[in-house]
Image: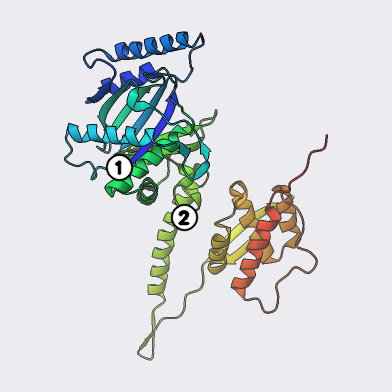
Amino acid sequence: MIAQGNAISHGARAIEYSMEKDKARLVKVNGLPENIEPLAMWSRMMQHQHQCMKDRYNPRPITLNALRFEISPAKEESAGWTMKDWQNLTDEFIFVLDGIDKRPGKSDCRFRPTNIKNSQYVVSLHIDSKSGIPHLHIVANRIDNTGKTNDAHYIGERAVHAANIINEKRGWVQSAQRRSENIQQISKDCIAILKAIPKFDWATYCQMLNAKGYDIKLTKDDTGVVKGYAIRKGNSIYKSSILGKSRKLMPSKIETTWAGLHASDKQTTVQSKEADAQTRVYDNKEMMPQSKSSIHHYSISVDGEQFEVDIPNIVKSVFDEELEHSEEEANQTNVLKVAALLFAGYLDAATSMSASSGGGGSPGSGWGKDKDDDERNWAIRCARMAKWLCKPIKRNRSR
């Protein structure tokens, strides 16, 4: 089970959405009549708040006037549940939440516990239209029935902590493990989609994610270029920066990832055909000569001069492995080119290109391939030196 919580300023809309969404079912109402309209319920909550503020001689109302929670057990955890089961889960969650008086993991950070049990609140049951996962919506008055304000400090962390306590008690999967499983599954589905589409474009990518039951929201700049996106699974949202190994599903990398997946398949097919073609018979004996390594060609322009660099497949693999964890995502291509220039012996060009990328420095006069270096070791040294050269220089600003 997972849970979310936050303090909101739009309690009226939250109650209206909670109760009037398609196929929403009322689970429980506390401190309010059940047979009135959602806005009438919120009106009563606001009357209570105004009266309490008046009694405090404080004419200024609170801005975040409601607490909202979403509670979502896994589909298998709530299979076959009746309305009574959902009511029991509501009561258990509120009881556990009200008992939390310190920040999870930081015992020295204490705060006043909430008093949701003795507050006006509305609980509704929704069914997610894509995944079919049932979940609860709770909207509670920020002011409890005694006139005190429900403390909202770290309310989101408290909701998660309450869910984890219930998970442990009921033997359910913890939220952190569920989150990790969801990230792995979403990443796997994204890679499968990239493999399936013959050409990458955002419309097709989004359409196929929707077909798998996910909601995707793109973030674009003023020119319409996609700068980020988030995928919603059930009631949880996952940003692209946490999906895929080395964040390779981010907008800045996803087209390269698509190209790599298809280039890998194409290269495998070509190599297989070449291997079959190279099978020859000598003296009635079938012999398979070793195929030549694939060559990767780079045409690199530095300070108006063009450098043509060829590197073997094994070297390219080393570069990919070493530069995979590079923190400088924006300069990833430049780091690769600098590494290729170093490998080919173009030291001045590599130094100049790294400087134009915001880096600086020089490998030094003693830099070069050692006599004991094999091709792989030399490639590793070049990749690591390229990362160091392209690392941005931190400059202190003086006033």
Which residue: 69% across, 63% down?
342
The answer to whether residue 398 is seen in the rendering is yes
Indicate the position of residue 222 as horizontal and vertical percent values: 55, 28
Q: Which element is circle 1 on?
A: loop
| Discs 2, 1 touching: Cβ within 8 Å | no
Q: Which quarter of the rendered picture does the C terminus lie within?
A: top right
Q: Label 1: which residue? A: 212
In the rendered view, tell whether residue 10 sits above or below residue 269: above
Q: Is 326 drawn above or below residue 17 in the view shown?
A: below
Specify the farthest residue to the bottom. 283
Q: Amino acid at mark 1?
A: Lys
Task: Return the mark for residue 157.
Answer: none
Asked where in the image residue 365 lies, by quadrant, the reply is: bottom right
Question: Is residue 66 shown left or right of residue 90?
Answer: right
Q: Report the coloring of the rendering.
A: rainbow
Q: Which amino acid type is shown beneath numbered disc 2?
A: Gly
Residue bearing mark 2: 260
The reply, left or right, for residue 238 in relation to residue 25 is right
In x, y percent, where is residue 152?
46, 28
Secondary-structure class at tag 2: helix
Give the mark nearest the N terminus, 2 or 1. Answer: 1
**Quick check: 243 above or below 135?**
below
